[in-house]
Image (cartoon, rainbow, N blue to C red):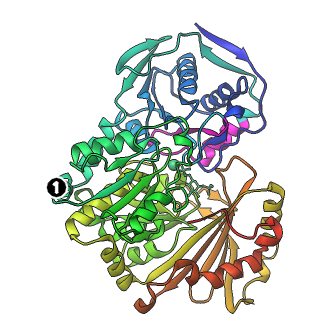
């Protein structure tokens, strides 16, 4: 029943920071999805008879592509497909299911925090048997294959019913439709003190969780409201919609502004949180205080031992290079390893597998641990809840105490979205060209001590990843980092990351943008951001 279909290559199927992301109409071109999926299968070895996990964040085109993946997996010789009911699986839940059921790998259909709908974004991401994003070796092999592919295999089958739990068969392959939430909820229960968190809710603790009409809705309903007893209504926008209700499911201060405003207002609940399209990011806001993801990583690491799953301590902490150094100070105090990786969760996989790191994080609202091999939005929210329950303090008090003992790393990211690719590349090329001339120069009163193009040497497998972002370090430990996004779908997105360390507790209450203003001005002077992009200000500040 399997058919071989002739095809011709597309030139643009290179996976980025987190899979292949394009506008929906690009994916809708005849053979576009098939070519990519076949290029992926052609780049893998030894999956005959094995299990493939498939799910997505419910965005537009999710259900159609799942059917294609099922028919192609069957034709290519997979023995079993495990699929989340309705095609739903959050990224961390998919990671867990791959691990739990010892699958060969998994395909996650998502463009994460990017908007969804007929003219918005779609994405395909492959995760390997450890549950983590495919490493560069695989993604580059897929791209190479996609440039020469001449045929794909697909089974002629009727569409599989993905809305009924149970096992069926498609062209010789078992198809198992599972509850997308149950396994994940059990995992969370094994890590956190649900009883203590439940008591906190029972005593009147109030929380607002914004699922942003994306994948975490069903997970939050089940875990927060049903299992932990939070009042009904704690989870908001909890029905996943193909277009996320027309919004960007990006939990930041721009796209989750309503939640932010509420948390800063007079009627703020005790705790506010949100997650993104595929459920791997988190936004943490206490009453009257936004916790930057970099600070959240540091605070979670410093307090993780208060949760049952981390009682025996952390083996190490890893963060992406642009993430602030706040977590480094915690690692130093705990006397554990600290690792600095390029942007993207795939770089944490080896450290987690090798038992070198327990907690990882990125400034882009991603935090996670060795319980899965992806960042995990609800996990971060639950760890915060566990810490709040044990410490019986507010987020604001915990943050203030943390800064008092470690100092505060003021931090912000400025994104310039949809910049012309030529202009963005010219900016980066020009900056690279003058890196060696920068040390010693004084810009806006700030002395540059070092400037380089970050390269990562993986301590586990020895692989080297170059050109992972330009770092400019200043006297006193401040720094700016510039890099181009690998997840955008229109033009280029320039990211400027700015960080300043402040040891003095008397200066821990400054406005972040004001505390960083000299560095922001220096970055523009050094890199010519306004000159190259023609933009007077960033599109998004987080
Ligand atoms: C962005 C973030 C990065 C994150 C990636 C995927 O990548 O900066 O930290 O890992 O998105 O996250 P980039 O290349 O655009 O800077 V998600 O939630 O889109 O899976
Ligand atoms: Co995401």
In the image, what residue occupies the spot 45% across and 75% down? 326
Instruction: Answer left or right for 198 relative to 181.
Output: left
Q: Which residue is mark 1?
A: 202
Q: Quadrant of residue 308?
A: bottom left
Q: Which residues are magenta?
A: 119-144
What is the residue that sits farthest to the top in this orientation? 1
- For residue 430, which quarter of the picture? bottom right
The C terminus, quarter of image: bottom right
**Is 149 drawn above or below residue 126 in the view shown?**
above
User: Above or below — where is 163 with respect to 254?
Assistant: above
Q: Position of residue 238 (x, y in %)?
A: 40, 42
Q: How many marks?
A: 1
Image position of 430 (left or right of 501): right
Camera-side residue of 375 and 231: 231
In percent of the image, x 44 and y 85: which residue is there? 508
Ligand 1 falls in which quarter? bottom right
């Amino acid at each position: 029943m399997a058919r071989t279909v002739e095809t011709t290559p597309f030139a643009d199927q290179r996976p980025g920071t987190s899979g292949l992301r394009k506008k929906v109409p690009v994916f809708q071109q005849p053979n576009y999805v098939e070519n990519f999926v076949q290029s992926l299968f052609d780049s893998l070895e030894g999956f005959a008879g094995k299990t493939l996990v498939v799910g997505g964040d419910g965005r537009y085109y999710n259900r159609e592509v799942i059917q294609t993946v099922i028919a192609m997996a069957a034709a290519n010789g997979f023995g079993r497909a495990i699929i989340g009911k309705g095609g739903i699986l959050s990224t961390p839940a998919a990671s867990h299911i791959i691990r739990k059921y010892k699958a060969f790998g998994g395909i996650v259909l998502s463009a994460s925090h990017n908007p969804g709908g007929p003219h918005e974004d779609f994405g395909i991401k492959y995760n390997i048997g450890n549950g983590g994003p495919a490493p560069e070796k695989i993604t580059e092999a897929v791209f190479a294959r996609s440039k020469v592919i001449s045929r794909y295999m697909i089974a002629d089958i009727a569409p599989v019913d993905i809305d009924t739990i149970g096992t069926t068969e498609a062209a010789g392959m078992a198809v198992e439709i599972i509850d997308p939430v149950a396994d994940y909820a059990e995992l969370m229960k094994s890590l956190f003190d649900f009883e203590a968190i439940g008591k906190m809710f029972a005593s009147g603790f109030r929380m607002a969780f914004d699922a942003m009409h994306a994948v975490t809705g069903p997970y939050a309903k089940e875990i927060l409201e049903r299992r932990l007893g939070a009042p009904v209504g704690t989870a908001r926008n909890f029905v996943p919609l193909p277009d996320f209700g027309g919004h960007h499911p990006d939990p930041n201060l721009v796209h989750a502004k309503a939640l932010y405003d509420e948390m800063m207002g007079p009627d703020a609940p005790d705790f506010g949180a949100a997650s993104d399209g595929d459920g791997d990011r988190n936004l943490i806001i206490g009453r009257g205080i936004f916790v930057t993801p970099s600070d959240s990583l540091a605070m979670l690491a410093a307090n993780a031992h208060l949760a049952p799953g981390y009682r025996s301590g952390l083996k190490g902490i890893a963060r992406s290079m642009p993430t602030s150094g706040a977590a480094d100070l915690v690692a130093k105090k705990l006397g554990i390893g600290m690792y600095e990786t390029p942007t993207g969760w795939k770089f944490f996989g080896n450290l987690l597998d090798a038992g070198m790191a327990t907690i990882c994080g990125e400034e882009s609202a991603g935090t996670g641990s060795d319980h899965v091999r992806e960042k995990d939005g609800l996990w971060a929210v639950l760890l915060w809840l566990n810490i709040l329950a044990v410490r019986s303090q507010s987020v604001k008090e915990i943050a203030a105490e943390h800064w008092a003992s470690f100092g505060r790393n003021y931090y912000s990211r400025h994104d310039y979205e949809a910049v012309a690719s030529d202009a963005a590349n010219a900016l980066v090329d020009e900056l690279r060209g003058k890196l060696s001339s920068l040390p010693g120069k004084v810009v806006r009163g700030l002395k540059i001590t070092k400037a380089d193009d970050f390269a990562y040497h993986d301590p586990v497998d020895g692989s080297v990843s170059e050109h992972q972002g330009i770092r400019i370090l200043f006297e006193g430990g401040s720094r700016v980092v510039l890099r181009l996004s690998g997840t955008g779908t229109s033009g280029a997105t320039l990211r400027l990351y700015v960080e300043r360390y402040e040891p003095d507790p008397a200066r821990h209450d400054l406005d972040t943008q004001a505390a960083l203003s000299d560095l922001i001005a220096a970055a523009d002077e050094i890199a010519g951001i306004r000159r190259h992009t023609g933009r007077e200000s960033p599109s998004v500040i987080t």
